[in-house]
Image (cartoon, rainbow, N blue to C red):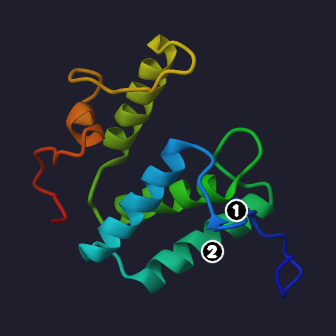
């Protein structure tokens, strides 16, 4: 519980500190850090957006399916900031979301999910760490 009595989303940890339960959590973390470093948003803006998402998840307003997690809130905050700052459009985010779902459906259990060229506009390049062509690049 927070000091205000609101439930806090649980940050996964072990004896050494915070950990990521899934690879996408680490990716969302790294993307948020990189976009902040690149100047898309300040860390105080990030903290405010993440806090709002955690509060919403605690109130049962999470946009994610299933039980809200810390990193589901992290991802929701990241998506909202990216949209608010004009770094992507909602249709682009939805196309990548669909591409990941399609890639997951064709991936054998236990194997890494990989986007390939053609899954979604720029999805393969973005997943590989390459910059996708765009007039809205942050770098």
Residue 134 spot, x, y in % from top left: 12, 49
Residue 129 spot, x, y in % from top left: 24, 46
Q: Secondary structure at mark 2?
A: helix
**Disc 1: which residue:** 13
Residue nearest the observer in this picture, 119 or 31: 31
- For image coordinates 10% across by 55% down, the residue present is 135
Q: Horizontally, is 103 left or right of 53 in the view?
A: left
- For image coordinates 28% across by 61% down, the residue present is 86
Residue 20 spot, x, y in % from top left: 59, 53
Q: Where's the N terminus, which quadrant?
A: bottom right
Q: Where's the C terminus, which quadrant?
A: bottom left
Q: Horizontally, is 52 left or right of 67 in the view?
A: left
Residue 51: numbered disc: 2
Residue 115: numbered disc: none
Q: Is residue 52 above or below residue 106?
A: below
Q: Nearer the viewer, mark 1 or mark 2?
A: 1
- For image coordinates 53% across by 51% down, the residue present is 25
Instruction: Say which label, 1 or 2, has the lower sequence index.
Output: 1
Query: Where on the picture, by quarter, is residue 116?
Result: top left
Q: Is residue 57 above or below residue 65?
A: below
Disc 1/disc 2 C-alpha distance (Å): 19 Å
Residue nearest the observer in this picture, 139 or 121: 139
- For image coordinates 69% across by 52% down, the residue present is 62
Q: Residues within 10 Å of mark 1 (few under 14, many from 20)?
A: few
Q: Secondary structure at mark 1?
A: strand
Query: Where on the picture, by quarter, is residue 93?
Result: top left
Query: Where on the picture, by quarter, is residue 84?
Result: bottom left
Q: Residues within 10 Å of mark 2 (few under 14, many from 20)?
A: some
């Amino acid at each position: 519980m927070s000091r205000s009595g609101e439930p806090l989303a649980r940050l996964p940890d072990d004896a050494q500190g915070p950990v990521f339960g899934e690879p996408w959590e680490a990716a969302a973390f790294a993307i948020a850090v990189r976009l902040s470093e690149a100047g898309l948003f300040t860390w105080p803006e990030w903290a405010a957006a993440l806090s709002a998402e955690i509060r919403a998840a605690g109130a049962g307003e999470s946009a994610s399916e299933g039980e809200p997690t810390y990193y589901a809130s992290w991802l929701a905050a990241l998506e909202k900031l990216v949209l608010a700052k004009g770094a992507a459009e909602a249709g682009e985010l939805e196309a990548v979301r669909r591409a990941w779902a399609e890639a997951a459906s064709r991936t054998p259990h236990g194997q890494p999910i990989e986007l390939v060229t053609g899954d979604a506009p720029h999805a393969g390049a973005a997943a590989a760490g390459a910059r996708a062509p765009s007039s809205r690049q942050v770098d």
